[in-house]
Image (spheres, rainbow, N blue to C red):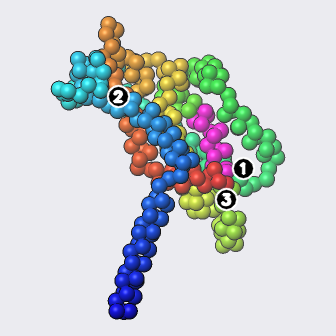
Amino acid sequence: MDEQHSIADSATKTASNDEQGLRTRIERALPTLPRAGRYAIAIALALLWVVPLIGMVMASVRPLSEIIDGWWHLRGMTITFENYREAWSFSSAPMGRAMLNTFVVTVPSVLVVTLLGAMAAYPFSRFEFPLRKTLFFVMIMVMAAPPELVAMGNYNTLRSIGLFDTYLGLILVHVGWGMGWVVMFLRNYLLGLPDELEEAARVDGASRYQIFRTIVLPYASPALVSVAVIQFTWVWNAFFFPMVFMRSSDSVLAPQALPLLKGRLQIDWGLVAAGSVMTMIVPILVFVFLQRYYKRGMVAAVAD
């Protein structure tokens, strides 16, 4: 009998412990009131961004007659990609040619500013030279200048040298505009590079160029990817600089072509939505494929 009682007591204690353990796990899994408040704010902000995006996608794949009273009416919904076909070959501003023009401007702007920014950031993070702090301060001041001021200073210059309304002229403007923040960003990242790596390379007889190519650039690859993603997004979505420096209809970029899709007599919102989706999908895909390196570069640059 005593043995049976002890077995029963043991089973009861085990069940009680399991119940308490389950209750503890549930309590730990449930967020506290402040954390629940932060979750609610984050979800609300996410909805503010996601709901218009869903509306735009829905409008791009439905006829105008179905979205004129609101895209959220789903009864009798018709899915069609006619809007994308029309936007791709639109008469006054075909999105196909506009996106190709945007690639022609964006890719060199990103590659050049990333490479030159790394070459300029390395001396600022490692070397001592006259006016070092002054030059760095001037770069930061350029970042604070409004784009209208940059346009005023470069408009007559590009006209005088024959680069106005050319891809090369617009690329130079984007490179000059992006150099300031790129140098500052990469300098902060390279400050975390251990001096011992460079000293060991110098002992082995490596030159400055070899150190930069074999040590600095591989070490800074996450930051370089972060710079490339941000610069790609800015240049791809830029509207002001192309509007000022590009005038010919054959050189229209994607952000310039979007307003032309609305037509003259009636705005076809499905057509505009399709052009908007085609324009924004490219930087989104770039970020999705490079997000792992982007996060590493952003966290390290801010932390340093």
Q: Residue at x 70, y 37 (%)?
A: 139
Q: In this view, does 234 lie above or below 211?
A: above
**Any magenta on residue 181?**
yes
Secondary structure, mark 1, is: helix
Q: Which amino acid does label 1 sit on?
A: Phe
Say which of marks 1 and 2 sits in front.
Answer: 2
Residue placed under numbered mark 2 in the picture? 56
- Where in the figure is residue 170, as x and y percent of width and height? 52, 28
Q: Distance between the residues labelled 1 and 2?
A: 45 Å
Mark 3 touches mark 2? (CB < 8 Å): no
- Relative to 196, is 12 on the left or the right? left
Say which of marks 3 and 1 sits in front.
Answer: 3
Q: Which numbered disc, 3 or 2, marks the residue that appears first in the sequence?
A: 2
The span picked out in magenta is: 175-188
Secondary structure, mark 2, is: helix
- Relative to 94, is 208 on the left or the right? right
Residue placed under numbered mark 3 in the picture? 192
Mark 1 touches mark 2? (CB < 8 Å): no
Mark 3 touches mark 1? (CB < 8 Å): no
